[in-house]
Amino acid sequence: MFPNLKAEMARYGLSYAQVAAALGRISAWLDAKLRGKGNISIQEALIIHDKFFPNMDYGYLFAREPVTSVGAVKKATA
């Protein structure tokens, strides 16, 4: 789940522990969420976006399918 978020975390060199810590959670919690075991709340998603990826499109970052083009971003966020 959230393949673009995982890809951007890797590009920025962010660990699950770093992102989870920003939410007051442990890395196993984030790992479970990114494997589809439950949801990330809107509030949690906003914190991740604002703290780590403020210049990225929210729809792109939290799309449930990989987005590889601008047209795909528009489709994923529609």
Image (tube, rainbow, N blue to C red):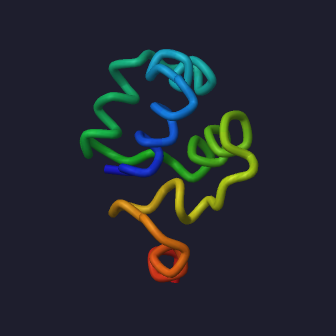
Report the number of numbered marks: 0
Query: Residue 68's spot in the image, x, y percent?
Result: 42, 65
34 with respect to 58 (left or right) = left
37 with respect to 56 (left or right) = left
Q: Residue at x 44, y 16 (%)?
A: 26
Query: Is 71 located above or below residue 41 in the figure?
Result: below
Query: Is 13 located above or below residue 36 in the figure?
Result: above
Q: Residue at x 45, y 76 (%)?
A: 72
Q: Residue at x 62, y 46 (%)?
A: 43
Query: Residue 69's spot in the image, x, y percent?
Result: 48, 71
Q: Residue at x 64, y 61 (%)?
A: 57
Query: Residue 30's spot in the image, x, y percent?
Result: 40, 29
Q: 67 or 24, which is in the foreground?
A: 67
Query: Is 37 located above or below residue 77 in the figure?
Result: above
Q: 33 or 74, which is in the foreground?
A: 74
Query: Residue 36's spot in the image, x, y percent?
Result: 26, 46
